[in-house]
Amino acid sequence: MACLAASIGLAGRDYFGRWATSPDLFYAFDEGLWQLAQAVGDLPADGQIYLTPRPATHATLAFAWRDGQPPITFDGRHVAVTAPDPQRRRFYAVIETEDFRSRLLLPELFPLIEHHTVINDRRGQRYATIYETPLAYPPVIRPQQLSGAVWNEQARLHGFNLNPTYRRGDIIYLRLFWQALAPIADDWTFFVHLLDAAGQNRLSADVAPGAGSYPTTRWQAGANGLWMRCRLPYRPPCPGDYQVEIGFYLSTGARIPLPTAAGADDHLWLAPLRIEETP
């Protein structure tokens, strides 16, 4: 009996003392997600609200928003979305313990952005932040190279950022600035190819927009900014001159048409790229 009583006492201490007050329960029981969902639910109903990087279908979030309209979600580590109507209040809810990039990118896009709500975990560390952008305040980041190419009268490439020169062993990053012109009924897959002087494909990446978190079927028609970040998955090949081409294709493999002055095409040449030997 003494052993049983001692066992019950120790179990009670562990359960109601050590375990119940553990800071790890904040994450184990989605306490942070629940607090964030409640904070998002308290935002103005007529505001434009975005959440990164969790989807609205996550069980905790879906339950919190079961009677209301969930925010638009995307993974800010791969894509950033700006609202189509700058005259409405705009909010970005960022789970900063998971999405490290949006915390840095949003102040670059909107230098006057403000902290609306901050959520800390039980250790006092920042878990999530809801940012609010000023009204009628467009993003300040612009593409370094302009384009204007339009795929199927539905998606326009405003421009892109791509370094003209890389060292052998560097990782090649490409940032693209898109605008949705009309609703897109199908999921498009984006591709980027690195072709050598002989036209051979030496490096490629085939990705769903936003790493699948923001497919083309969810692109908001009229949105002025969709920043898509793409990384070629392998190191550059031998030193030399290369050409970068991009485009979209359907699940059937058929490429999305791209009208040009010379007729229809299925890809766009971006820019030449040179890879130099590492000194």
Image (tube, rainbow, N blue to C red):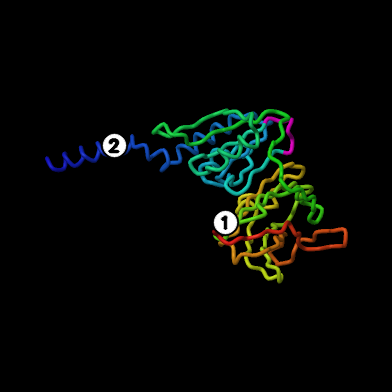
- Is 141 drawn above or below residue 243 in the view shown? above
Amino acid type at circle 2 is: Arg
* Sequence-earlier tag: 1 or 2: 2
Quadrant, the N terminus: top left
Q: Nearer the viewer, residue 194 or 56?
A: 194
Q: Main secondary structure of the magenta part?
A: loop
Q: Nearer the viewer, residue 252 or 105?
A: 105
Q: Which residue is mark 1?
A: 171
Q: For the point 74% across and 42% down, which residue is it?
A: 223
Q: For the point 69% across and 36% down, which residue is it?
A: 140
- Is 276 drawn above or below residue 47 in the view shown? below
Q: Quadrant of residue 171?
A: bottom right
Viewer-side label of 1, 2: 1
| Residue 73 position in % (x across, y down) | 61, 44
Neighbourhood count class around disc 1 (C-alpha, 10 Å): few under 14, some 14–19, many 20 upward:
few
Taking the view exactly as shown, the residue that stands out farthest to the right is 262
Q: Which residue is mark 2?
A: 18
Question: Label 1 to label 2, Cα distance in Å?
Answer: 46 Å
**Left or right placement of residue 144 versus residue 173 in this view:** right
Amino acid type at circle 1 is: Ile
| Residue 3 position in % (x across, y down) | 13, 43
| Residue 136 position in % (x across, y down) | 73, 30
Q: Nearer the viewer, residue 85 or 267?
A: 267
Q: Quadrant of residue 56?
A: top right
Please give the range of residues in magenta.
Answer: 84-89
Neighbourhood count class around disc 2 (C-alpha, 10 Å): few under 14, some 14–19, many 20 upward:
few
